[in-house]
């Protein structure tokens, strides 16, 4: 009987393998995201110093840009799509699949929502719900395409999703420029959606819409499914060891398809929610330009396989992202610096995961179960 | 002076000693067979000879001169050539291109394709290695690809040709042709090192034999003066890891079903082991001991076949049955089709032909819920090493009742207690458990669900003696409770101690069925190596008409 009141949601699928030093392990694992972030910031500071930027000016500017007066709401507004995109990446990742096609799923979802809102006259409520459903379905479908391609032809999901992303973005762009374009302006955007399809604003700033509670609720739902349901268990088992799951009778290909579709649906939904919010139209490039997808991937990787951490790491990186723009305005530091931070985070997390795994392999006591030598085993 | 001589080769991988002071000398012009079970150290030894591994001790002499071996390039320069079990050819390139690659004939710096082709043709004719020089390798049958590999070695002037399990991928006809070629090669004064576990071909094709077991030489023979029995004893021998001979506490009922009514037949080598058993088959047999009624088979395997693409079929017409309350053992050298067979029986794999019935109904694809299955591969299949013990114990029952973390852990705790699994907590990753305890956990998961058929692979591999006894007791208990147990093991004492009868697989077929009290090491070993069955490749010396290329 362990008296832990609230067990960590999952400790079982971090990219590291558990090391023999058991008591030290949880602490070390928890330290990984912190370590990665600190190291990334340190290296970024170094870059600032090398390029002649004064960190003592840049960092306060960054903080003010993110949470300063008037900026906080904007940061929260950016947090919502980033969190949604984080889920789009994190859900398939639980079965071990990388969904790198977030941009395409996002853009197509957005344009699908705009198309429904523009072309189908709908009563209130439905006028919001239906476009969102269409957005989720579209994004989900685009991501799902990778599943049969993997099952039938063995094409890795990471490749398919990435390669389908660009055509997805291009198709959305085409639709916004031609069939759905606002006439007479020459701007690549749709007309403003009918008022019934507008998401109501929360607060005075106009930035915040019900997208925040919707995405937050879905995120909580995901955390629940992941940790507390048979489906979540099967997904985790598939991610931990596909062959083990297959052996246990889990339909691994089916699960892969489900999680991919769910991830894509989140991306599409984010697109829909964004389009139905201000400025209430699909503007070509507006969904993908802020780089939600990439920030989200960095955030999920930073969470190192612990779903409960995803909302937190996403918040951190959103602050960096938004703050970077403030930093650019105030201190004249290019906001690309925050992309350096994100890139470094990914690299450091990957390196930490790799070194830990390698260390584990070396330290794991060899059992006689292992083949007398690898070559004999390979040659029956 | 030997053409090539290995002196005191020792090679360790971590704590495992793959080769332990092995001496091997190969004379010019001889075919020298190196035999041994899987894991005996054959492939490692060949890798050392070919420069792929650096030995921890010992060295290689070529015509009495010590070779400095840093990589296969040194071995090739020293006149060694190796044909790997998995061919290393470019399927998109032609035969000629594959043969000359890395040592192309050139004229003024340009590849001389005409000379290359002529040379390949010349070598092919000289050694009877017929292969169309301009054919793309990817379009050729496996047997011809192997010839290309041999040509590759001969083109580089190999005087010692190492072949690693060359017949594993060949049909008997192709194998016979291969041995013809090897005779020609040795007739020209070169030497052949033939790595195999098939005694039939050893006796038919080799001049001398060196037997390895657990990384050591356990016998050196001149083929003409030895017998299959002698080789088997050296190969499988008495030196088997000490296993419990009479450990399992047996139920009396189970004991009474033996031994007089057990069938002890050796089947012919050219047919499937036994005729397809049917549910009503056993009732036709002689009456059993009083008080015991003979049950129909719970598991019926009928004429299973798995096609092997271009090579021989991994499972080639297997039929047998298992009753409730009996343990049927499966013996065989690794790679004889056991893995594929058990994958089909458990539902994880679909057969190409034949069917598996469990209590009269076909097994369900993708893991039949009526089958308990303890796989050999503990880290790769039986567990998810990074998941907690509780999560590992759950697999298969996650949909059984309402999912609740508390219930999952509670169930796990019950199993931990009942099966004596030693762990600090059920939340610990299963990879933190010792091999024996992890194996007990797998058994606990599979045996605690009262499933009628229990399939077990290598249950005591890599576990300590204490856990071994416990595991044997658990399997015997499952049997006594009416389970039908199918036990695959490479430990012959384990099979004898537990199984009621033992099926022996060789080259995808069941070649013998022995009651365990008649299953001596020699008889099992002979069957496992195809010696008892009059190996298919042993009698093929005359029939080499036709060219598959």
Image: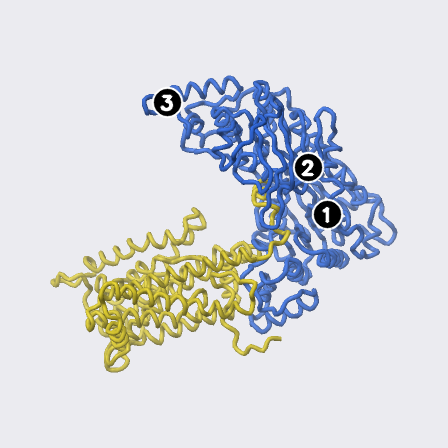
Distance from the alpha carbon under mark 3 to that under mark 2 = 46 Å
Q: Nearer the viewer, mark 1 or mark 2?
A: 2
Visible in this render: residue B304?
A: no
Is residue A48 toward the left or the right of residue A234 in the image?
left
Q: Which is more toward the observer, B376 or B453? A: B376
Which mark is first along the chain, 2 or 3? 3
Q: Which is more toward the observer, A105 or B382? A: B382
Is residue A298 toward the left or the right of residue B155 in the image?
left
Q: Which chain is yellow?
A: A
Distance from the alpha carbon under mark 1 to that under mark 2 = 16 Å
Dot 3 and dot 2 residues touching (CB under 8 Å): no
**Helix or strand or loop: what does disc 3 sit on?**
helix
Residue, disc 3? B113
The quarter of the picture where the N terminus of chain B appears is: top right
Please, which chain is the residue tagged with disc 1 on? B
Q: Residues within 10 Å of mark 3 (few under 14, many from 20)?
A: some
Q: Which mark is residue B241?
A: 1
Q: Which chain is blue?
A: B
Q: Nearer the viewer, mark 3 or mark 1?
A: 1
């Amino acid at each position: 009987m362990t008296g832990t009141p609230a067990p960590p949601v999952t400790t079982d699928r971090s990219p590291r393998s558990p090391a023999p030093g058991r008591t030290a392990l949880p602490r070390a694992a928890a330290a990984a995201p912190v370590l990665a972030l600190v190291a990334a910031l340190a290296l970024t500071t170094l870059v600032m110093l090398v390029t002649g930027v004064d960190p003592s000016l840049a960092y306060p500017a960054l903080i003010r840009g993110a949470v300063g007066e008037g900026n906080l709401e904007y940061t929260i507004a950016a947090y919502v799509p980033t969190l949604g995109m984080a889920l789009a990446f994190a859900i398939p990742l639980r079965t071990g699949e990388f969904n790198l096609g977030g941009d395409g799923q996002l853009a197509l979802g957005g344009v699908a929502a705009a198309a429904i809102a523009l072309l189908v006259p709908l009563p209130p409520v439905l006028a919001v719900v239906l476009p969102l459903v269409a957005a989720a379905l579209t994004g989900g479908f685009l991501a799902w395409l990778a599943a049969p391609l993997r099952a039938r032809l063995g094409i890795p999901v990471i490749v398919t999703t990435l390669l389908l992303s660009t055509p997805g973005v291009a198709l959305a762009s085409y639709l916004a420029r031609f069939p759905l374009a606002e006439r007479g302006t020459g701007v690549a955007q749709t007309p403003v959606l009918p008022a019934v399809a507008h998401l109501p604003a929360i607060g005075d700033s106009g930035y915040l819409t019900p997208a925040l509670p919707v995405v937050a609720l879905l995120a909580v739902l995901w955390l629940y499914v992941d940790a507390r349901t048979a489906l979540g268990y099967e997904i985790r088992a598939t991610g931990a060891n596909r062959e083990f799951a297959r052996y246990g009778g889990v339909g691994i290909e089916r699960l892969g398809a489900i999680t991919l579709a769910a991830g894509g649906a989140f991306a599409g939904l984010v697109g829909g929610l964004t389009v139905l919010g201000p400025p209430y139209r699909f503007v070509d490039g507006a969904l993908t330009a802020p780089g939600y997808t990439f920030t989200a991937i960095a955030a999920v990787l930073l969470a190192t396989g612990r779903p409960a951490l995803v909302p937190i790491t996403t918040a951190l990186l959103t602050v960096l992202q938004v703050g970077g723009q403030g930093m650019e305005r105030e201190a004249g530091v290019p906001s690309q610096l925050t992309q350096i931070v994100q890139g470094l985070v990914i690299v450091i997390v990957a390196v930490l995961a790799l070194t830990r795994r390698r260390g584990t392999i070396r330290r794991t006591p060899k059992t006689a179960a292992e083949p007398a030598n690898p070559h004999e085993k390979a040659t029956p | 002076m030997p053409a090539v001589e290995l002196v005191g080769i020792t090679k360790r991988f971590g704590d495992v000693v793959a080769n332990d002071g092995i001496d091997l000398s190969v004379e010019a012009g001889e075919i020298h067979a190196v035999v041994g079970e899987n894991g005996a150290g054959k492939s490692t030894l060949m890798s050392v000879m070919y420069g792929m591994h650096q030995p921890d001790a010992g060295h290689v002499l070529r015509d009495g001169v010590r070779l400095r071996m840093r990589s296969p390039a040194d071995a090739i320069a020293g006149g060694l050539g190796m044909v790997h079990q998995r061919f290393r050819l470019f399927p998109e390139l032609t035969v000629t291109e594959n043969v000359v690659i890395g040592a192309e004939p050139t004229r003024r710096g340009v590849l001389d394709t005409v000379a290359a082709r002529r040379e390949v043709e010349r070598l092919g004719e000289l050694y009877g290695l017929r292969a169309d020089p301009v054919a793309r390798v990817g379009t050729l049958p496996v047997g011809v690809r192997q010839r290309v590999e041999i040509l590759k070695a001969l083109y580089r002037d190999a005087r010692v040709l190492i072949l690693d399990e060359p017949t594993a991928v060949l049909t008997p006809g192709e194998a016979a042709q291969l041995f013809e070629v090897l005779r020609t090669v040795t007739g020209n004064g070169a030497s052949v090192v033939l790595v195999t576990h098939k005694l039939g071909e050893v006796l038919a094709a080799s001049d001398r034999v060196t037997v390895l077991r657990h990384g050591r030489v356990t016998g050196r023979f001149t083929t003409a003066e030895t017998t299959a029995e002698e080789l088997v004893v050296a190969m499988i021998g008495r030196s088997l890891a000490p296993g419990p001979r009479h450990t399992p506490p047996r139920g009396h009922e189970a004991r009474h079903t033996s031994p007089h009514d057990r069938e002890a037949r050796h089947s012919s080598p050219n047919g499937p082991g036994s005729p397809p058993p049917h549910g009503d088959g056993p009732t036709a047999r002689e009456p059993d001991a009083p008080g015991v009624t003979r049950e129909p088979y719970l598991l019926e395997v009928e004429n299973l076949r798995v096609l092997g693409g271009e090579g021989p079929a991994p499972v080639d017409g297997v039929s047998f049955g298992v009753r409730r309350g009996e343990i049927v053992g499966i013996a065989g050298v690794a790679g004889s089709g056991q893995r594929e067979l058990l994958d089909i029986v458990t539902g994880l794999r679909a057969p190409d032909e034949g069917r598996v019935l469990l209590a009269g109904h076909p097994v369900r694809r993708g893991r039949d819920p009526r089958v308990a299955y303890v796989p050999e591969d503990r880290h790769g299949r039986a567990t998810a090493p990074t998941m907690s013990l509780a999560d590992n114990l759950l697999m298969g029952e996650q949909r059984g009742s309402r999912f609740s973390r508390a219930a999952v852990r509670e169930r796990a705790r019950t199993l931990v207690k009942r099966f004596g699994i030693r762990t600090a907590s059920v939340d610990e990753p299963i990879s933190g458990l010792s091999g024996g305890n992890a194996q007990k956990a797998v058994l606990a998961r599979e045996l605690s669900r009262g499933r009628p058929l229990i399939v077990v692979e290598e249950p005591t591999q890599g576990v300590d003696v204490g856990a071994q006894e416990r595991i044997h007791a658990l399997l015997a208990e499952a049997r006594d409770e009416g389970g039908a147990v199918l036990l695959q093991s490479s430990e012959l004492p384990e099979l004898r101690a537990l199984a009621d009868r033992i099926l022996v697989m060789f080259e995808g077929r069941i070649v013998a069925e022995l009651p365990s009290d008649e299953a001596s090491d020699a008889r099992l070993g002979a069957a496992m190596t195809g010696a008892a069955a009059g190996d298919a490749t042993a009698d093929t010396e005359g029939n080499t008409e036709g060219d598959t290329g």
